[in-house]
Amino acid sequence: MDRRTIFNGWLLPIVLVLPQLLVTIFFFFWPAGEAIWSSMTTTDPFGQGWVFVGLANFADLFSDPLYLATIIRTVFFCGAVSILAMSVALALAIFADREIRGRAIYRTLLIWPYAVAPAVSAVLWLFILNPQVGLLGRWLNAHGMPWDYYLNGNQAMAMVILASAWKQVSYNFIFFLAGLQSIPRSVTEAARMDGARGWHRFRTITFPLLAPTTFFLLVVNLVYAAFDTFGTIFALTQGGPGQDTETLVIKVYRDGMINQDIGGSSAQSVVLMALVIGVTAIQFRFMGRRTNA
């Protein structure tokens, strides 16, 4: 039955909606509008004002091979972080959902990393993987396995992927565990009585029922990897060595705050915003349709 709340006047609905509407306007639409406007301007050579250049900043971006390489690097980074964080979280949720002694303690400990700030998370990984002071980094070098992410771009990328995924595992774990607990036990018991065991039962029964949760988390993880990993990457590598770990959000900061290219940086932020909105729309439209099928 469709239950609707009907208000007698127009004042109360406006009062209820107004706070969220103001937050959206001041913290999303206004900054987004400023970024779009700045992306079509450039500062004059003397820094005394701005000049309207239309889409010239965007044309310069997509003719720059370094920027195109950054887009490819960001896509790879977001995909790797999302897959790793979701896979580990799903495995942990499956084990935590079982009837084991002390599972409440395990669940609490698995949730804790989500409360760690990105910069603090990066410092923790420095104590582990730094080639001079890190426990694992020093051990690898001492046993003949060269490890120095300051010089090796592949090692640096692996490190930021690992640190960023670790930070997001707890968030995914909460949703996967809730999804597993929402599956009726009668369904899994019936599958077990029909002979479905282990991986076969998970592949044919459990995971399809987790599809809505999985698709939601995929969108959230992609957005997280595109934006919220700035603190982790900047604290670990600052986008180096060279540009091997420079994602789009790092490049936006470097070009805008360090190189003072406000127009080019704004154009990059608009492109990044459009990419994230596009990915989100595709996920909810096409994958959501598959979920409801």
Image (tube, rainbow, N blue to C red):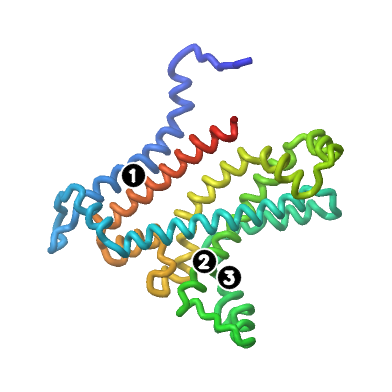
Residue 155 at x, y percent in the picture: 51, 73
Is the residue under label 1 in contact with that under label 2 (CB below 8 Å)? no
Dot label at residue 211: none
User: Hey, what amino acid is under mark 1?
Assistant: Ala
What residue type is disc 3 on? Trp
At x 67%, y 54%, the residue is: 111
Expressed as whole percent of the image width and height from the top left, the position of residue 105 reads 78, 55
Q: Are marks 1 and 3 in contact (CB under 8 Å)?
A: no
**Is disc 1 placed on a helix, strand or loop?**
helix
Asked if disc 3 and disc 2 are in contact, CB closer than 8 Å, the reply is no
The residue where tag 3 is placed is 125
> Badge 2: few (under 14), some or many (20 or more) residues near its Cα, within 10 Å?
many
The answer to which image quadrant residue 28 occupies is top left
Q: Residue at x 46, y 71 (%)?
A: 237
Question: Dot 3, how many residues are within 10 Å of its Cα: few (below 14), some (14-19), or many (20+)?
Answer: many
Label at residue 32: 1
Residue drawn at (46%, 73%) of the image: 153
Tell me the quadrant of the picture where the N terminus can be found.
top right
In the depicted view, which residue is nearer to us: 214 or 38? 214
Quarter of the image for residue 183 reads top right
Vertical side of 81 occupied by 31: above or below: above
Q: Could you tell me how far apart the alpha carbons at marks 1 and 3 are, in whole angstroms?
A: 34 Å
In the image, 6 versus 97, the foreground residue is 97
Quadrant in the picture for residue 257: bottom left
In primary-sequence order, the first of circles 2 and 1 is 1
Judge from the rendering whether residue 130 lies leftward or rightward of residue 139; answer left or right.
left
Kindly identify the amino acid type of the residue bearing the numbered disc 2: Val
Q: Residue furthest top?
A: 8
Of the two numbered discs 3 and 2 on the same chain, state the one appearing first in sequence.
Answer: 3
143 to 35, vertically: above or below: below
Report which residue position mark 2 lands on: 160
Up-down relation of residue 211 to residue 108 (above or below): above
